[in-house]
């Protein structure tokens, strides 16, 4: 693997910033060796996949990354007053972009540490909780899904460890594969330091209220997990093949994703899962997507009390997207307390200029006063992650 490693590192350096240049060798590197060995001990044969070598190169580069030397001091540490915490932030490893060149009908964006830190400086974000919730690139291929989940967790952990003053991360599960997900989440949280778990609205077509997922959520309940949910493409399995179940010609990531959030939380509610999980806190993206519009229609008024109690007491709503001009009003009309609102940027899937624009709409939003807006960016999230993140 040696010469290919050198080449890949040269390519990697191009997409990172010049001050990130490293020289590493995954053949002899103890980090790469540990990753392969611990995965094998969990039944995951990473060596079987051709995305493993480039992934290890990237992970090893972060493991050896000397942030103090290579990142300008004004970007490395949050500026005074940069107290916002971003719960909806994605990093995109280069190896992952290669196997997932687009998602939600949109090209996968290039992510660099430099741009991420600039974005955070621009928006006064002190800390970003990074997530990559979707390991289901090769649909129906359990081994590949499990391997990708493991490599994503190792990658997130290495990055967060390299720049601990700015990053935390959510674990990637291996759902819809439940036993493997229990192993993966345990490893990501107990060994790698994930602060919660990121799921998608459906995993290979199964929504989160699916009875198959009951043992997974029983574990989430037992550990009192924070579960961040992200929308995904709707899928239909037809005779063993997965089809995109979206009749629209528009990018799924723009419109369909809001319906996905609604579908999965309605499924969690109507299946009884949401009400049962009294120790789990959910982070719901885009202040609920289309969910608020359909709660009254979907849920029998006689059954709604415990569901609304769960939505009001154990669900947190991130601001990602242009959500504060009109949409937030629909959510707050259900007597959701503004103290459960969180900040989310969705960078880099939402490009920097649009993040700037939605920041302005938060400032102009008629639905919250200044103190509530400030709490949304900082105090609320600190209450949620108390004991899990050292702010
Ligand atoms: C990796 O393997 C897959 C499936 O075996 C193949 O389709 C793909 O072209 C390979 N990618 C590279 C970069 O070799
Ligand atoms: C940060 O702000 C500067 C100045 O407005 C702008 O040029 C740059 O594109 C922004 N970068 C990011 C990643 O948001
Ligand atoms: C999946 O991985 C297991 C364990 O490494 C292996 O025994 C099995 O043959 C693999 N399945 C496929 C379809 O490659
Ligand atoms: C909810 O909890 C009850 C009581 O423990 C249990 O009987 C039921 O199966 C659970 N339902 C779901 C969907 O978790």
Image (cartoon, rainbow, N blue to C red):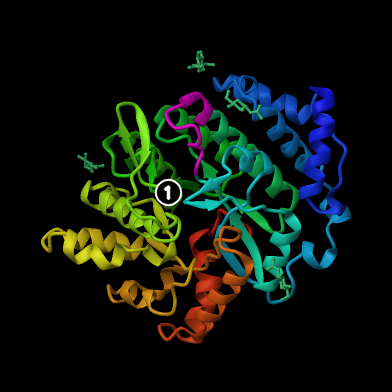
Q: Is residue 15 magenta?
A: no
Q: Going 63% across and 39% down the picture, which residue do you hit?
A: 98
* Residue 129 image-quadrant placement: bottom right
- Classify mark 1: helix, strand or loop: loop
Q: Going 50% across and 43% down the picture, which residue do you hit?
A: 134
Ligand 2 quarter of the rendering:
bottom right
Residues shaded magenta: 134-145
Give x and y (percent) for residue 187. Answer: 56, 34
Q: Is residue 268 above or below residue 4?
A: below
Give x and y (percent) for residue 212. Answer: 30, 33
Asked if one can make out residue 192 in the rendered structure from this viewpoint, the answer is no
What secondary structure characterizes most of the magenta part? loop
Q: Residue furthest front?
A: 249
User: Exactly how many numbered labels are in the figure?
Assistant: 1
Asked if one can make out residue 384 in the rendered structure from this viewpoint, the answer is yes
Give x and y (percent) for residue 90. Answer: 58, 54
Q: Quadrant of the C terminus?
A: bottom right
Residue, disc 1: 232
* Residue 378 image-quadrant placement: bottom right
Other residues around mark 1 within 10 Å, as few (<14) / some (14–19) / many (≥20): many
Q: Is residue 11 left or right of residue 96?
A: right
Q: Is residue 35 left or right of residue 377?
A: right
Give x and y (percent) for residue 115. Answer: 72, 61
- Mark 1 and ligand 4: say if the CB distance to the nearest ligand atom is below 8 Å: no
Q: Is residue 56 above or below residue 84?
A: above
Along the line of sight, the residue nearer the viewer: 253 or 176: 253
Q: Going 32% across and 48% down the picture, which residue do you hit?
A: 277
Q: Is residue 165 above or below residue 65?
A: below
Q: Going 43% across and 83% down the picture, which residue do you hit?
A: 368
Q: Quadrant of the N terminus?
A: top right
């Amino acid at each position: 693997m040696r010469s290919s490693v050198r080449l890949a590192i040269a390519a990697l350096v191009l997409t990172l910033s010049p001050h990130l240049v490293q020289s590493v060798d995954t053949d002899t590197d103890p980090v790469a060796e540990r990753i392969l060995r611990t995965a094998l001990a969990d039944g995951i044969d990473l060596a079987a996949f051709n995305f493993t070598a480039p992934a290890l190169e990237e992970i090893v580069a972060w493991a050896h990354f000397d942030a103090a030397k290579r990142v300008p001091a004004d970007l490395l540490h949050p500026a005074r007053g940069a107290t916002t915490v971003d719960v909806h932030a994605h990093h995109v490893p280069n190896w992952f972009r290669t196997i997932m060149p687009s998602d939600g009908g949109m090209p996968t964006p290039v992510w660099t540490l430099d741009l991420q830190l600039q974005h955070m400086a621009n928006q006064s974000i002190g800390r970003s909780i990074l997530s990559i919730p979707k390991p289901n690139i090769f649909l129906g291929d359990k081994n590949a899904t499990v391997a990708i989940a493991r490599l994503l967790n190792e990658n997130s952990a290495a990055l967060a460890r390299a720049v601990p003053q700015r990053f935390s991360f959510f674990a990637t599960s291996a759902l819809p594969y439940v036993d493997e997900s229990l192993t993966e989440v345990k490893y990501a949280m107990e060994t790698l330091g994930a602060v919660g778990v990121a799921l998608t609205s459906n995993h290979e077509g199964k929504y989160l209220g699916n009875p198959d997922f009951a043992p997974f959520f029983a574990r989430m309940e037992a550990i009192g997990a924070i579960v961040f949910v992200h929308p995904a493409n709707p899928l239909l399995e037809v005779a063993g093949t997965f089809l995109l179940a979206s009749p629209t010609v528009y990018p799924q990531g723009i419109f369909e994703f809001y319906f996905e959030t609604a579908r999965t939380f309605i499924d969690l509610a109507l299946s009884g899962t949401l009400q049962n999980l009294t120790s789990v806190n959910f982070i719901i993206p885009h202040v609920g997507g289309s969910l608020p519009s359909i709660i009254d229609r979907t849920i029998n008024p006689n059954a709604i009390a415990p569901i609304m109690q769960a939505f009001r007491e154990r669900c947190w709503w991130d601001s990602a997207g242009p959500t504060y001009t009109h949409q937030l009003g629909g959510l707050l009309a259900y007597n959701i307390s503004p103290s459960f609102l969180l900040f989310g940027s969705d960078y880099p899937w939402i490009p920097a200029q649009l993040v700037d624009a939605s920041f302005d709409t938060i400032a102009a939003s008629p639905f919250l006063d200044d103190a509530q807006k400030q709490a949304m960016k900082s105090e609320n999230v600190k209450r949620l992650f108390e004991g899990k993140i050292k702010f």
